[in-house]
Image (cartoon, coloured by chain):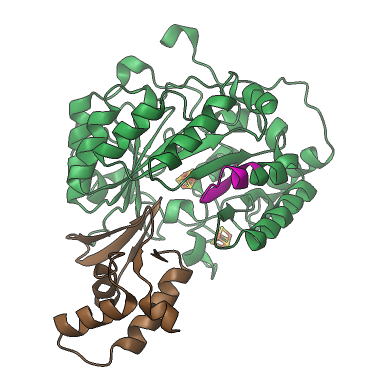
Chain colours: A brown, B green
Amino acid sequence: MSDTLNSKPGIALGYRLQWEEVQQCHVLLYPEGMVQLNDTAAAILAFCDGKRSVLGVIAALENEYEAEDLREDVVAFLHEAVDRGWVRYG
Amino acid sequence: MAKPPPPLWLLAEVTHSCPLQCPYCSNPLDLIPKKDELDTENWLRVLHEARQIGAAQLGFSGGEPLVRKDLEVLIGAARKLGFYSNLITSGIGMDAERVERFRELGLDHIQVSFQADDAVLNDYLAGTHSFQHKLDMARAVKANGYPMVLCFVIHRQNIGQVRQMLDLAAELQADYVELATAQYEGWALLNRDHLLPTQAQVREAERIAHEYQAKLKGKMRIYYVVPDYYENRPKPCVGGWGRVFLAVAPDGLALPCHSARGLPGLELHNVRERSIEWIWNESPGFNHFRGEGWMKEPCRTCDEREKDFGGCHCQAFKLTGDPTNADPTCAKSPHHHLVEKAIDTSELGIITSKPIVFRQRNKNSK
Ligand code: SF4
Ligand code: SF4
């Protein structure tokens, strides 16, 4: 577990996070596909820059949104994002 | 009528020209001549207008898009507009430098298609020596920091080699492999008796695909979709007619699906005359099969109609003569026997007396 918390998540090769004006939401684009993201998912992914560790992402989110105890949500989301191939650990 | 949702996919069929001659090509038999192709300026306008109404994915396809000398211009513009752009190519017409240029201009993804896993069959099907170059290009794509995405079009002539194809892909360290079924349109429909695999071949290929999916999990993603002829239910028509997909043919005709040209009763418009916004939102062609008003029995009262939208109208037309019929690949269709008969022909291994026809241009229409 602590291993994962210190590793650095980044958007996977070939994926791009972007705001879509017409759809009024963030989307993740990838080879021949796209997913619409809810605000939480978009906020987390925006900090997955391959330089911050998972702990760093959590801290950045808590700071940005003046929130506490985001760890569980972020870890759960990243787990799923890795499973779907959106995020890779560098 | 309420305004339809935005198109998400723009397929830019920039040319029908192609150095290869695949007999499974789904381009129409009447290939659009080069002189009728949209010019750069018109393509740039199409990209701009499609992006404005919400298209986010862009596919450059053809024919062979690399034939267009202005491809670099279009790729650069697409990136600036915020498209995620995909190049769907045979790899013939680029070298490592051109791949690098595409990268710098902001192309997001390159899919290289193969005809087979070995040079002999590949080059026979392609009608030219191209295998070695494809290998080089697959490697060049990856060397430029792209995911390597390979596509094998599967049919009777090569379906026995799915294992070897996947081995080749693994050896090349591909990230994604698509085992795509030939779409029985255009040249592929003409050659269907040579191309349609048997039920047993389809299931064996599926088994091997699953075996490799398990074996290579986390390394290489493999997509294999059983062809609709064998499924008893149709595939949904391009995500629903006029719901997500907009294609523009080389001559500028805007199409709700890339094979919709020539459907009877369908009024299509050209991007030279009308804006993309009007075509998508208002044109009779894009509204033609929106909703369910057009449906007949058995689709009209079927509880699966929101899943497949009655299937493929082009296929219904080609096989039954009426695009408002249920797609005959559906077991509920009164025309389903037409599909069964085609499969039977394949089961019997009947060698048709018609020779296989390689794609070519009518000599008079250069
Ligand atoms: S009857 Fe029509 S709607 Fe129902 S499954 Fe078949 S094609 Fe789809
Ligand atoms: S009808 Fe078939 S070929 Fe036509 S648009 Fe739909 S899926 Fe494509």
* Residue B256 visible to an observer of this rendering: yes
The image position of residue B265, as x and y in percent, is 40, 39
**Residue A31 colored magenta?**
no
Q: Quadrant of residue B185?
A: top right
Locate residue B102 relative to residue B361 in the image: left or right. left
Q: Residue at x 68, y 59 (%)?
A: B210
In the rendered image, the residue lying farthest to the right is: B348
Which residue is at the front of the view, B22 or A57? A57
Q: Residue at x 75, y 44 (%)?
A: B343
Locate residue B350 relative to residue B35 in the image: left or right. right
Q: Establish if B127 lies above or below B191.
A: above
The image position of residue A64, as x and y in percent, is 15, 80
Q: Quadrant of residue B273?
A: top left
Locate residue B92 relative to residue B355 in the image: left or right. left
Q: Which residues are magenta?
A: B168-182
Q: Residue at x 31, y 19 (%)?
A: B36
In the rendered image, the residue lying farthest to the bottom is: A69
In the rendered image, the residue lying farthest to the top is: B364
Q: For the C terminus of chain B, which image quadrant?
A: top left
Total count of labels: 0
Q: Establish if B364 lies above or below A54.
A: above
* Residue B271 visible to an observer of this rendering: no
Q: For the N terminus of chain B, which image quadrant?
A: bottom left
Q: Residue at x 66, y 22 (%)?
A: B124
Which residue is at the front of the view, B108 or B4? B108
The image position of residue B186, as x and y in percent, is 54, 30
Q: Establish if B7 lies above or below B361.
A: below
The image position of residue A37, as x and y in percent, is 30, 70
**Residue B178 colored magenta?**
yes
